[in-house]
Image (cartoon, rainbow, N blue to C red):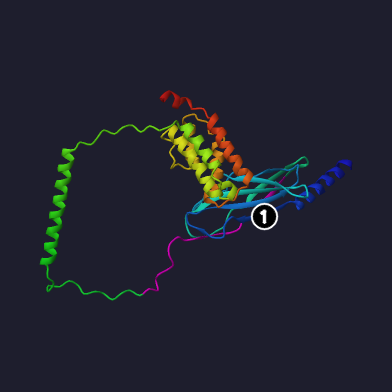
Amino acid sequence: MRTLALALISFLLLSANAAAQQVRSALTTDTVRVGDIFGVAVQVDLPREAELIVPDTLALSGDLENAARKRVRVDSLADGTFRHLITYPITAWRPGQFPLPAIEIMVRTARGQQSLAATLPELEVLSVLPADTTGIEAKPPRDVWGASRLWWPLLLLAILALALLAAAIWWWRHRRNRTAAPAAEPLTPAIPPLEWALAELARIRGSGWLERGDYRRYYIALSETLRRYTAMLDGNWGIDLTTGELEARMRETRAEPGALLGILEHADLVKFAQHMPARDRAAQDLEAAQRWLENFQKPPLLAEAA
């Protein structure tokens, strides 16, 4: 009887805790078009001692695709609970109505583990093409060319165009033969890559963008500085790569990205998903970028090539 009573009390406590938990979901933008990167946000309020476990990406397929791994933000509330905000960046490649899959959320406390289901809103994707033009009336057909048309002006114009083209080709070849092209000199940076990157961070820090709340311009400059620095270290780490592609290329040369990936992923959310970060978080990203630049070790394969 005592064991049965304890089990009943534990069940009531878990039920009361689940009832107190609040799960909400929404899209980070009102209008989504084909190719846009937007966020699916899930908000969960949990007690202080609870641990939240969610998947890194959404289970998408077909014309929906994950753009990056999840981003988690935790804020403390006045009643002593914690508010977890999980954002999943995704993109769509076809217009229409798309149901988003529910997210299974695991909540772990000292009393046990339970599962919650976050139902996501239905997604409507708009086309980037102009509106339907089927109502536009076609112009009447023009007269066809007949035997009465004068052809000699057109033939004369064509002969003149061919003569001018031949003269231009002769002049270009004659000039190329007279002046040999100078040998290309190897491009070398005016200053070492690390010194250049640190100077750029100092410029961003003194630009005033952070103080004025211009987070998008702030993160564009920060992301471009880090990407150009990695491209200076290795041509395979080009600035045209996505964050995921850059991670894969760096690991191929046994390089450990470290904090670089987190900074670039946060910058992608601000640039493409219209995410508004906290000012303290933006300042921390800049300091983390400087520490990464100062402590990053060149991988063994690049050192051998050098």
Q: Nearer the viewer, residue 39 or 190?
A: 190
Q: Relative to 85, does residue 249 appear above or below in the rendering?
A: above
Q: Which residue is drawn at 51% across and 27% down?
A: 297
Residue at label 1? 24
* Left or right of 301 in this view: 159: left
Q: Residues within 10 Å of mark 1 (few under 14, many from 20)?
A: some
Q: Position of residue 41 (x, y in %)?
A: 62, 52
Q: Residue at x 38, y 32 (%)?
A: 188
Q: Position of residue 231 (x, y in %)?
A: 44, 36
Q: What element carries label 1?
A: strand
Majority secondary structure of the magenta segment?
loop
Q: What residue type is labelled 1?
A: Arg
Q: Relative to 200, does residue 153 appear above or below in the rendering?
A: below
Q: Residue at x 69, y 44 (%)?
A: 52
Range of magenta residues: 114-136
* Left or right of 116 in this view: 237: left
Residue 135 covered by magenta stretch? yes
Q: Which residue is drawn at 11% across and 62% down?
A: 156
Report the residue that reaches farthest toward the top: 304
Q: Which of 62 and 285 is in front in this view?
A: 285
Q: Where is residue 14 in the image (x, y as percent from the top left)?
A: 78, 47
Taking the image as drawn, is residue 212 in sight? yes
Q: Where is residue 276 in the image (x, y as percent from the top left)?
A: 59, 51
Taking the image as drawn, is residue 67 in sight? no
Q: Relative to 243, does residue 150 appear above or below in the rendering?
A: below
